Image (spheres, grey):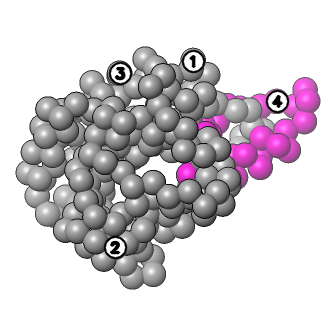
């Protein structure tokens, strides 16, 4: 489900696909990102410098890249629709998290569903993806439950499970800016009829 042809295994359910985007694609995307007005960047922070900023301006060049990625995926999962860029500035640190944290209620509800009980279908995150758009110092991704550290390179795509064994954190950014694009892989699971995810 997570492993793509051409990817390298870094740990349990952690894969890197080197140079997933071409140098030309990467430079064109960076040009678009750097033209986004400051007021369009929205911060998501806790504990001071833990967090990042997302630009609520779609980067249209992600559409073709997402299509290429979708064509490589197993049919039981699908790629989220995000076209947003993310940036972290010098001194910022990412929060320690799993990528299913917004979907834990969905998973619990699905586990409580009894056979023959009426059900609805809900979206569930099975993996997180990070595409790296520039080279930077620091900003490595650390998988604490596996003691795996990866130092990304511009153009790389990292895919990891959303589950606890792939809990991770972006370490302190040491250079000016770290640009990336994040998304999820989803599947659909059964939940009790009328269930509403509050996130």
Quarter the C terminus occupies:
bottom right
Question: Distance between the Cα atoms at labels 1 and 3?
Answer: 14 Å
Q: Residue 118 carries which label?
A: 4
Asked where in the image residue 102 lies, by quadrant, the reply is: bottom right
Q: Residue 68 carries which label?
A: 3
Q: Mark 2 points at which residue?
A: 92
Question: Distance between the Cα atoms at labels 4 and 3?
Answer: 37 Å
Decide: is 47 above or below 102. below
Graded by Cα atoms within 10 Å as few (under 14), some (14 to 19) or many (20 or more), the crowding at tag 1 reads: few
Which numbered disc, 4 or 2, marks the residue closer to the eye?
Answer: 2
Q: Indicate the secondary structure of the residue bearing disc 3.
A: helix
Decide: is 25 above or below 171. above
- Residues marked 1 and 2 touching at CB (< 8 Å): no
The residue under the point 56% across, 52% down is 99
The residue under the point 36% across, 36% down is 18
Is residue 109 covered in magenta? yes
Which numbered disc, 4 or 1, marks the residue closer to the eye?
Answer: 1
Q: Indicate the secondary structure of the residue bearing disc 2.
A: loop
- Give the residues drawn in magenta, as a range: 99-126
Mark earlier in primary sequence (2, 3): 3
Q: Is residue 45 among the parts visible in the rendering?
A: no
Q: Mark 1 points at which residue?
A: 75
Residue 134: percent from left, percent from top: 22, 50
Left or right: residue 130 compared with residue 23: right
Asked where in the image residue 168 lies, by quadrant, the reply is: bottom right
Which numbered disc, 4 or 3, marks the residue closer to the eye?
Answer: 3
């Amino acid at each position: 489900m997570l492993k793509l042809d051409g990817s390298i295994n870094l740990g349990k359910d952690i894969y890197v696909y080197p140079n997933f985007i071409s140098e030309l694609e990467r430079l064109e995307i960076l040009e678009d990102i750097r033209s986004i007005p400051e007021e369009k960047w929205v911060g998501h922070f806790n504990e001071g410098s833990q967090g990042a900023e997302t630009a609520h301006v779609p980067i249209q060049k992600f559409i073709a890249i997402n299509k290429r990625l979708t064509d490589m995926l197993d049919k039981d999962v699908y790629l989220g629709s995000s076209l947003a860029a993310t940036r972290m500035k010098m001194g910022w640190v990412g929060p320690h998290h799993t990528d299913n944290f917004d979907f834990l209620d969905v998973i619990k509800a699905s586990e409580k569903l009894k056979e023959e009980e009426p059900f609805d279908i809900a979206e569930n995150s099975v993996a997180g993806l990070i595409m790296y758009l520039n080279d930077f110092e620091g900003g490595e991704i650390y998988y604490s439950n596996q003691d795996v550290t990866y130092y990304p390179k511009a153009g790389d795509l990292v895919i990891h499970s959303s589950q606890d064994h792939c809990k991770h954190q972006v370490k302190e950014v040491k250079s000016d800016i770290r640009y990336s694009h994040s998304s999820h892989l989803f599947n659909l699971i059964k939940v009790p009829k009328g269930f509403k995810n509050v996130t």
